[in-house]
Image (tube, rainbow, N blue to C red):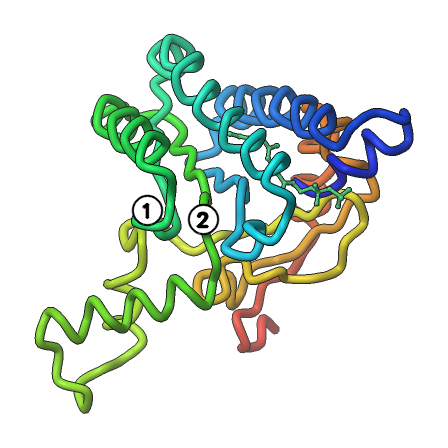
Amino acid sequence: MDGNGRWAQARKERRTQGHLEGLKAAKRIVKAASDMGIRYLTLYVFSTENWKRTAEEVGFIMGLVKQYLRAELAFYRENHIRLRHAGDMAGLPPQIAGELTEVCNVTREWGGLQVILALNYGGRDEIIRAVNRAARAGIEPQTITEETIAAFLDNPDVPDPDLIIRSAGEFRISNFLLWEGAYAEYYVSPVLWPDWTEQELRLALEDYQKRERKFGGITR
Ligand code: FPP
């Protein structure tokens, strides 16, 4: 969800105002994705690297997350949205981890769109945690395959993403879904995240529909 800071800067406002608008954009996109019948949507909310930001900004984002988790439950219920988490739960402030676990549990059986909040998430960190889990489960090193690693990722039942969208014109992976995104299509939009509406999501999907996916093979 890139561009919150730039959005605020362009209006001579504080970066935190950009995150507040970013949260509103996230709500619009979750609603649009749910209405369109999309099955999975992962939002990169906070990376393992984002702790380097000022204490004020980190505190503000965490506050927004907490507020979002609580305030949106009725909306999730209405739209049968299931909330999930990707990332290192152990590194999150206990209050956030508690709320997150609770909302994930309450929405567990809801069968609509699955919204995965990548929070304290890093692609490398996820792979390291997966390998550690495999080791603790007693997996013999010589038996390890792609399927073994995939089975120990944060949400092993969630399919690999078809499309990874970046806002604000960034052409980087930024440690996002490194394993799962191996064959994902990328879409980069110049639109800053707080300005995202259903229309931007539609443009991304229309672009995706024109792609020819080969997964390393050939199609003709
Ligand atoms: C990246 O833009 C954005 C973030 C690191 C924070 C995203 C968090 C939210 C939108 C609020 C919480 C959302 C949910 C769904 C709970 P940036 O700050 O790097 O912007 P810049 O690249 O313009 O500086």
Q: At 50% from the left edge and 65% from the top edge, which residue is drawn?
A: 178
Q: At 75% from the left edge and 32% from the top edge, which residue is drawn?
A: 15
Q: At 52% from the left edge and 20% from the top edge, which residue is drawn?
A: 35
Q: Where on the picture, by quarter, is residue 152? A: bottom left
| SS class, disc 2 | strand
Q: Where on the picture, by quarter, is residue 193? A: top right
| SS class, disc 1 | helix
**Pointer 1 and pointer 2: residues touching (CB < 8 Å)?**
yes
Q: Amino acid at mark 2?
A: Asn
Horizontal relation, residue 25 to residue 13: left or right: left
Depth check: 30 or 138 in front?
A: 138
- For disc 2, the marked residue is 120
Horizontal relation, residue 29 to residue 132: left or right: right
The extreme left residue here reads 138
Q: Where on the picture, by quarter, is residue 153? A: bottom left
- For disc 1, the marked residue is 89
